[in-house]
Every structure is written in structure tokens, then in C-alpha cells.
Image (tube, coloured by chain):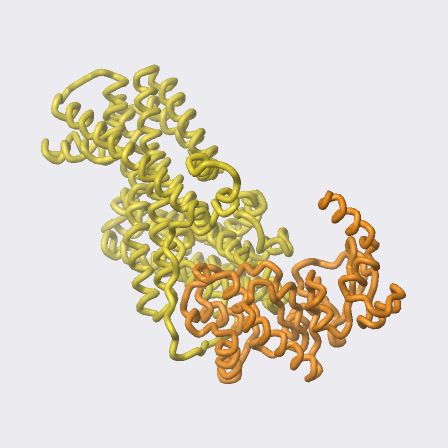
């Protein structure tokens, strides 16, 4: 799946760069920088889950007693680790340079892209292992503790996860950033040339067109790229050392603290599931990044599509155009929000051989996942409202109204999606690898999105037929609440 | 299948008069320790037990009194706030045992519960099981160690290749194989027709 995304996005980026009416050198630099960011983000983001499992496993336990040398065990462990990522790594190494070479007709450019992709992959694997190691040893050493410690853990995780999302944001802003170079002062444009992945993007462009407008930028680009290559070599050595170390079980052991009070505070079952999910998320970078992804995505989109704000900001509120931004933001948030339920349901696969024996009703599980997903949705809505308030205060009322009403249809779509997933997968809902079962989730995802879009369609149809904004909003609200009630009814009827 | 992890293809099972399809009611009456204890690694025993108690809708006061006793009995106090990921196999087993016992279930389903436990905890668990049975509770105990089954169980079922080939008290099974003195291990080998095979294999290995 990851390899497919990287391949498709890579081909699209490079070919569209050639077709766009813009400076070809800039298009090449932008395209390569964007693709390197995507490769880095996707391998780190998706690799975190598997890297964490690798870190916590004791893979060498079976190998060490065998009559093989320590060197051979190290090689096997390294191969085991690389095998986890093999297809996306190979896809990026082959597809991206070929797509670039074909698009720009340059072998030297393609070879530079190849070098840049390899460098990026080493960075990505190093970051994934570093984060997995760091969080795992923090979990193992840190233990449970108070709400304050949980908050501290979340903060620590944010500090590490947000830069990853910023790297993802580069894909949205690469064009603006490179274009900005034309207007920036000399020192600032030099600074951008020094930054990864732009330095490698400029290097690829330079190796493709051999056109030097500003020798200092070319020199800085080559110099910083060489530094990144050196860093990648060092990272690779560190990676090999750490992966082998992990395999031999060199991860920190846990702490022992005599506790004074052995008491627990059980609540209703749905709250138990919710608290469990939040606790796991506070210790697992992969689940935490999944939970905050919708919020971050809203921030990124609100900046990368900032023209939508400026078009309507301050202008008289034309009904259709003023609805465009909230509608767009709602669709984006919802598409990402609807990815959460399958991922949250997949957390149940942890310890299913035990949890499956507990008297947990399907509807309790679905309710807990719906509440958690709705909280994330409301959080992204709140962020979205804050941004709107700062950038287009004139839109805040319509945004709040639309977002508030849509919460009902969002909750309904989450419930419909989760109900359908549990119906399709039956008992196997809680077992297995999420990515290997992704095809099961496509249909519920589409259904969930359709359910969420119905009130919006009703709104626009009412507006077109009656030209009444008030009637449109009434119909929007009624449809959203009706959907919500139907979903609740179906949930109550579920065992 | 009794624990709800596998769906029955056919047939009918009742637990204390409740059909297996009444999943929540049936699961509420039982405590289960799986053979391979895989718990939620990033939680601590306190957090894991709180999750289990929430699902079982247990009252805080009642469960805490019981929990205090169980945690002390199985010497888990010093690991109560240590992440499960950092616990030894034996301590993970203890957490699973405490989770299975904390709601005082009528039925206990234990799959090799003694594996990984130290001698002290193993003795405590055996005593607890005997006490549980003496109070009228039921225990379904799965083990490959015949000595343990012989000492602990009142009725023994022998399963060979997925089929029940013998069931009853140990004395009843002795009668079945027409042996007055044999141990449960010998009875097992006779019932499963593996006794001769064992002798042949041992001879071949010694040769």
C-alpha cells in the first residue's frame, strides 16, 4: 500500500512538474523536495508501528543458541529489520529516479534523485528506530503513574511527532517555499538551500539542467547535500549498531517500585475502553500520531489552501462562496477522521487472546471508539475555528454553525462505518494486521463518507431550490440529527 | 470455544443453564487464563486490571478489597506500576491469574496456568483452586502435566487428536484401561494408544 502511494505520487509529481507552466528548474527542485518529504514521512509514520514491535521483540533469542557466529546473527537481524520495509524502500529507489529521468530526460538528474532517495530512506529508518527505541525505553522505565506523568509523556511525544508532520507539510508548501526564493533576500534564500530536503532538490535540479544563475546557491546546495550524505553514512552506521543491539536485547529493563496502595478505579465499560485507548496512545508514537493526525491535517490544509480564506474574508457573505471553506474543511477533516475507527478497532488486536474472553458488548466497543473519534473530530473543529477566527473573522459564525451541526452527521458516519466494519469482519474484527486487511475497510469508509455528505447535499439542494439560507440550515440540521438518531438506534439494537 | 474466542460450528453448550450465545452473561460468570499470556504491554498491571474491572462492571470497593489480597498473595505489589512489557513471563502470568480471579467467577477456565509461576505462587494458586471448588465453583483446567491433573482434578478428560477419548475420575479411568495402580500418565498413554510407541522410541534413542 505504502509502495503504491509513493509510486503513484512520485510519477504524478514529476510528470505534472513538467506540464506545469512554471520554471522547469524550480519544478524539478520542488518535485524532488516534495517527494523526499513524502518518502521520509511515510516510511517514518507507517514504519513506527513495526519498528516498535521490532524493538519490543526479542528476535535474537532463537538465533543466539544456534551454531552461528555473532557476526552472522547481526547480519540476519539487520536483514530481518530491512525486510519489514523492503517493498516501500525498493519502490522508492526504483520508481522515483525512473519517473524523474523520464520526465526531465536526464540520467545525471535521475542518478542524483536515486542518491537523494537512498539518503532519505536512511534518515527515515534512523528516525523510526530512534523514536521507537526512545518511546519504548521511556515506557519500560517510566511505568504508569499520575495524570501529570501521562501529560508529560504526551508532551514528550508531541515534541517528537510534530516535526514529522512538519516534514509532511513541506509537500504542501514546497512550491510556495521555492517560489519564495525569488523574492527573499539573498541570505534567506541561501538558508533555504541549506535545509533538507531543499538542498537535495536543488542538487537534482542542478544535475539535470547544469544551469547556474547564482553560483553561491549552487555551491551551498552541493556543499549541504554532501553534508547530508555524510550524515546519512553516519546514521546508517548508527542504525546497524542499534538494530543489532535491539536484536540482542540491549533495550533497558523495567523499574520496580513498591506501591503503597493497590487500588483501581473501574468505571463504565465504554469509559474503560476509552481510558485504555488513551493510555496506549500516550505510550505508543504510532497510535498517538494516528490520533493527532486529523488535527495537524486541518492546520496544514488551512495554510496550504489559504486562498480560500482570502477570497471570502471581509467580503459580503455570499451564501455559496462563504460555505465553500467550511465545506472543504469539513470534508477534509471527515475523510481523515473516518480513517480513525479502523485503526482504533485494530488496537483491540492487542491481547485479543485474553480480551476476547471478557464480557464486552460490540456496541460498547463501538460506542467507545465513536466517542474517541468524535472527540478528535471536535478537537480538529476547534482548531479549525481558531484559525478561522484569526484569519477570517467574518466567517466564524457560519463556520461554527456548519461545524457544530455537522458534528451529528460526523458521529453518525463514524457509527455507521464502525458498525459496517464489525459486520464485515465479524469476530475477526479484533485480530490481524491493519494494513493487510485494508481492503475490508474501503467499503465502510465510502459508506461513512457518503453518510456524512448527505446533509451537505440536502443543504445545497434546498438552497438551489428555495434560495433560502435559513431553510437550508434547517434542512442541514434536521438531516444531521436524523442520521445521528438512526445510527444510535442501530447501535442500541446491536448486541 | 467456551471463552468466546472461537465460534462453534454446531452443537449446543450451556454454562450454568445459560446458552453460549448469551455471550456477555456467560463471560461474566467466568475467569480465563490463556496458555500464552499476551496482555497489553504498554499498560501497567494497575491499568490493565482497571480496564478488565471496568468491562466486568465491578464495584470499586468490592474489587479493591479482593485485589489487595490477590496482589499480596501473588507478590505483585512491587510490579503493580511497572509496564507489563517489562515484566517476566511469570509475573505476566500472575497478572492474568489475578485478572481471572478478581471478580470471583463461578467458572474458571485455566489453560496451563502454572507454567511460568514460581513454586510459591504455584502453591497459592493450587490452594485457591481447591478452595474455589470446595465452595461450589467449577474449574476447567487444561494441562499437559499429568501429575498436576492427577493431584488437582476431580474429573479428568483425555483429548487425543481433537476427540475426547476418556472422561471420568482417575479411578474411573483406571477401570477403563483395566489397570488398578497406574498413574494418570500411564492411563493417558494407554487411552491414547501411545504406550508401545514410547517404549520403541526410547529404545531407538538409547541404541
- Asked if residue B35 lies left or right of residue A179, the reply is right
Q: Nearer the viewer, residue B99 or A197?
A: B99
Pinpoint residue A167: horizontal percent, then vertical percent: 30, 41
Q: Say which chain is yellow.
A: A
Pinpoint residue A295: horizontal percent, then vertical percent: 35, 53
Pinpoint residue B6: horizontal percent, then vertical percent: 68, 58
Task: Check the image and name the residue furthest to the front.
Answer: B207
The residue located at (37%, 29%) in the rendering is A13
- Asked if residue A192 lies left or right of residue A434, the reply is left
Q: Quadrant of the C terminus of chain B?
A: top right
Q: Nearer the viewer, residue A54 or B202?
A: B202
Pinpoint residue A325: horizontal percent, then vertical percent: 34, 48
Q: Is the residue A33 above or below the residue A388 in the image?
A: above
Q: Say which chain is orange.
A: B
Hey, which quadrant is residue B164 in on the image?
A: bottom right
The residue located at (28%, 45%) in the rendering is A303
- Asked if residue B11 lies left or right of residue A383, the reply is right
Amino acid at each position: 500500500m505504502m509502495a503504491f502511494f509513493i509510486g503513484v505520487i512520485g510519477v504524478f509529481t514529476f510528470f505534472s512538474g513538467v506540464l506545469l507552466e512554471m520554471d522547469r528548474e524550480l519544478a524539478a527542485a520542488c518535485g524532488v523536495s516534495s517527494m523526499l518529504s513524502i518518502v521520509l514521512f511515510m516510511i517514518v509514520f507507517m514504519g513506527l508501528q513495526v519498528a516498535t514491535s521490532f524493538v519490543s521483540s526479542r528476535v535474537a533469542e532463537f538465533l543466539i543458541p544456534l551454531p552461528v557466529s555473532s557476526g552472522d546473527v547481526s547480519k540476519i537481524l539487520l536483514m530481518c529489520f530491512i525486510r519489514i520495509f523492503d517493498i516501500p524502500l525498493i519502490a522508492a529507489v526504483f520508481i522515483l529516479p525512473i519517473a524523474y529521468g523520464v520526465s526531465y530526460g536526464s540520467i545525471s538528474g535521475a542518478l542524483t534523485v536515486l542518491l537523494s532517495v537512498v539518503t532519505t530512506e536512511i534518515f527515515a529508518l534512523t528516525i523510526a528506530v530512534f523514536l521507537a527505541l526512545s518511546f519504548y525505553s521511556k515506557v519500560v522505565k517510566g511505568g504508569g503513574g499520575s495524570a501529570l506523568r501521562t501529560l508529560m509523556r504526551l508532551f514528550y511525544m508531541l515534541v517528537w511527532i510534530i516535526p514529522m508532520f512538519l516534514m509532511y507539510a513541506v509537500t504542501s508548501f514546497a512550491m510556495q517555499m521555492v517560489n519564495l526564493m525569488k523574492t527573499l533576500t539573498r541570505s534567506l534564500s541561501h538558508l533555504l538551500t541549506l535545509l533538507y530536503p531543499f538542498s537535495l532538490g536543488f542538487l537534482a535540479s542542478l544535475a539535470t539542467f547544469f544551469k547556474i544563475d547564482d553560483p553561491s546557491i549552487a555551491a551551498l546546495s552541493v556543499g549541504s547535500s554532501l553534508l547530508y550524505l555524510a550524515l546519512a553514512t553516519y546514521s546508517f552506521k548508527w542504525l546497524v549498531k542499534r538494530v543489532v543491539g535491539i536484536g540482542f536485547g540491549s533495550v533497558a529493563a523495567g523499574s520496580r517500585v513498591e506501591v503503597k496502595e493497590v487500588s483501581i478505579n473501574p468505571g463504565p465499560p465504554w469509559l474503560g475502553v476509552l481510558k485504555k485507548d488513551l493510555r496506549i496512545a500516550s505510550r505508543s508514537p504510532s497510535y498517538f500520531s494516528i490520533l493527532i493526525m486529523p488535527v495537524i491535517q486541518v492546520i496544514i490544509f488551512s495554510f496550504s489552501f489559504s486562498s480560500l480564506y482570502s477570497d471570502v474574508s471581509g467580503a459580503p457573505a455570499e451564501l455559496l462562496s462563504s460555505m465553500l471553506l467550511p465545506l472543504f474543511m469539513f470534508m477534509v477533516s471527515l475523510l481523515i477522521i473516518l480513517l480513525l475507527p479502523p485503526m482504533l478497532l485494530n488496537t483491540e488486536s492487542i491481547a485479543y487472546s485474553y480480551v476476547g474472553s471478557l464480557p464486552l458488548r460490540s456496541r460498547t466497543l463501538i460506542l467507545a471508539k465513536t466517542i474517541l473519534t468524535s472527540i478528535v473530530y471536535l478537537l480538529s473543529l476547534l482548531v479549525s475555528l481558531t484559525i478561522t477566527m484569526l484569519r477570517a473573522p467574518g466567517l466564524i459564525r457560519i463556520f461554527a454553525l456548519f461545524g457544530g451541526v455537522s458534528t451529528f452527521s460526523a458521529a453518525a458516519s463514524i457509527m455507521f462505518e464502525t458498525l459496517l466494519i464489525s459486520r464485515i469482519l465479524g469476530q475477526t474484527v479484533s485480530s490481524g494486521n491493519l494494513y493487510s486487511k485494508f481492503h475490508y475497510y474501503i467499503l465502510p469508509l465510502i459508506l461513512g463518507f457518503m453518510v456524512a455528505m448527505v446533509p451537505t447535499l440536502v443543504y445545497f439542494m434546498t438552497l438551489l431550490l428555495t434560495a433560502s439560507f435559513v431553510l437550508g440550515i434547517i434542512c442541514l440540521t434536521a438531516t444531521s440529527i436524523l442520521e445521528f438518531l438512526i445510527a444510535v438506534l442501530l447501535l442500541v439494537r446491536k448486541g | 470455544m467456551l471463552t468466546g474466542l472461537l465460534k462453534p460450528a454446531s452443537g449446543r453448550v450451556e454454562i450454568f443453564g445459560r446458552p453460549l450465545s448469551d455471550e456477555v452473561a456467560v463471560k461474566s460468570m467466568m475467569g480465563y487464563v490463556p496458555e500464552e499470556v499476551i496482555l497489553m504491554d504498554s499498560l501497567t498491571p494497575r491499568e490493565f486490571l482497571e480496564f478488565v474491572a471496568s468491562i466486568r462492571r465491578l464495584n470499586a470497593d468490592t474489587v479493591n478489597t479482593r485485589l489487595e489480597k490477590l496482589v499480596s498473595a501473588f507478590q505483585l505489589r512491587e510490579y503493580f506500576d511497572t509496564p507489563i512489557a517489562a515484566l517476566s513471563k511469570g509475573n505476566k502470568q500472575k497478572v492474568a491469574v489475578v485478572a481471572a480471579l478478581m471478580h470471583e467467577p463461578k467458572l474458571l477456565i485455566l489453560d496451563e496456568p502454572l507454567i511460568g509461576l514460581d513454586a510459591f505462587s504455584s502453591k497459592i494458586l493450587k490452594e485457591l483452586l481447591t478452595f474455589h471448588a470446595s465452595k461450589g465453583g467449577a474449574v476447567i483446567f487444561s494441562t499437559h502435566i499429568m501429575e498436576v491433573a492427577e493431584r488437582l482434578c476431580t474429573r479428568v478428560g483425555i483429548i487425543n487428536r481433537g476427540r475426547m477419548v476418556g472422561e471420568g475420575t482417575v479411578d474411573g479411568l483406571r477401570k477403563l484401561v483395566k489397570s488398578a495402580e497406574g498413574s494418570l500418565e500411564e492411563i493417558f498413554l494407554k487411552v491414547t494408544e501411545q504406550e508401545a510407541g514410547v517404549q520403541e522410541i526410547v529404545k531407538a534413542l538409547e541404541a
